[in-house]
Amino acid sequence: MAQFVYQARSASSGQQKGTLAAHDKSAAVEELRKRGLVVLTLKERKKTVLSVEIYIGNPVKTIHFIVYCRQFATLIRAGVNIVEATRILGEQSESKPLKKALVDVNSSLLRGVSFSQSLMDHKRIFPSMFVNMVRAGEESGDLEGTLERLAIFFEKEHVTREKIKSALTYPAIVGFIAISAVIYLLKAVVPQFVTMFESMNAELPTITKIVLAASNSLSHQWYIWLICVIGIIVIYQIAKRTTRGAYIIDYGLLKMPIFGKLRQKGAVAQMTRTLSSLYSSSVPVLQSLSIVEEVVNNKVIGGFIRKSAESLRQGKPLSDPLRKAWVFPPLVTQMIAIGEETGSLDKMLEKIADFYEMDVEQTVDRLKSLIEPLLLVFLAGVVGVIVAAVMIPMFGMYENFGK
């Protein structure tokens, strides 16, 4: 898809300039004519090293994608056709990558390509779940309802993710402050007392020896600490890229005290919400499970979902493998089994998601009230140990002077 810079004139707004994505110059001219513009000049923008945009991770912010889903659903409900809705949203989107993708999708739609097929050319922008649900909506003739479900899904998922993130952010900030305070005390404060302690020629307490050794190591062998930190980060990143390593990391995160349960509940809410949305949009269940495995982004839970898919292929119920999975509470598996028996699996999955999203919200509120005093006590304790290590020998020295 090439980028073209154009100058054009319209009867209503006069002369205007802009850029346009199209497969070739003829397609660009045709697109501008359909917009009611008379082309004055049209030049292809050549790509250079400096003009190539590099994105790490998902190039579109979640909030921008949520706004797009909600506005798209609203326009379709109001009777605006897909081509026009895509053009409007492409022009007003705040996200530059999403804007470019929508312009490209609009060009594909004008050439007669289906909406879902146009989306597949931009897999980094539009998640596989979005594409598959749109395709199912096109096939069933209920694209409006599908887009509404997608908007609700991404909104709820974003709220749940932000709740978990907020619960993890506060401990991370306090932990950073604690480490910074310890480094400052060991580097700037403790060394000032070393000469005085050496002149005392007295046996120092064990706690003082440990603190002095740590201070000396941090001052003179700081590169060893730096190498260790970098080494841990590198090993973690390498491990994440291997199947076994990623599984161990995800298993460890789920088994963490306090926060492991929070992650587990969040993952269950995300899994059931995704599966409910896909199932209610008539996406084939095996394909839905494959998408859910990708969406949860957890190797442990993904493994159990894969086993459930294998169970379904063999004609067994979805709930059977989940009953043996420690990550899914009995409530989840029992409600899924009831949903399978009554033929209302999508409704049951939605109820599970609602319950665990509320549970995550309540857990986060409890954690915030509990963690704050605990972290303050921890921070005070760490600083107190260093201060005590310095002060105890000084008290002993003052006692000796008094004698």
Image (cartoon, rainbow, N blue to C red):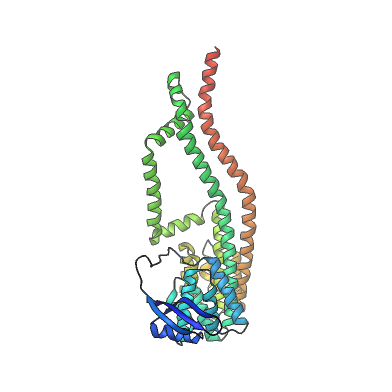
Looking at the image, which is closer to me, 62 or 260? Answer: 62
Is the residue 290 above or below the residue 260 in the image? below
Quarter assignment of residue 156: bottom right
Image location (x, y in percent) of residue 336: 58, 71
Image position of 103 (left or right of 231): right
Specify the quadrant that holds the N terminus: bottom left
Decide if residue 192 is in sight here: yes
In front of the other: 131 or 36:
36
Number of marks in the image?
0
Residue at 44% over, 70% down: 124
Q: Is residue 322 left or right of residue 351?
A: left
Q: Position of residue 30 (x, y in %)?
A: 44, 86
**Percent x, y of residue 391:** 53, 26
**Quadrant (top left/top right/bottom left/bottom right) for the C terminus:** top right
Residue 283 seen in the figure: no
Q: Residue at x 48, y 37 (%)?
A: 184
Which residue, as the protein is rendered here, is positioned at the far top? 403
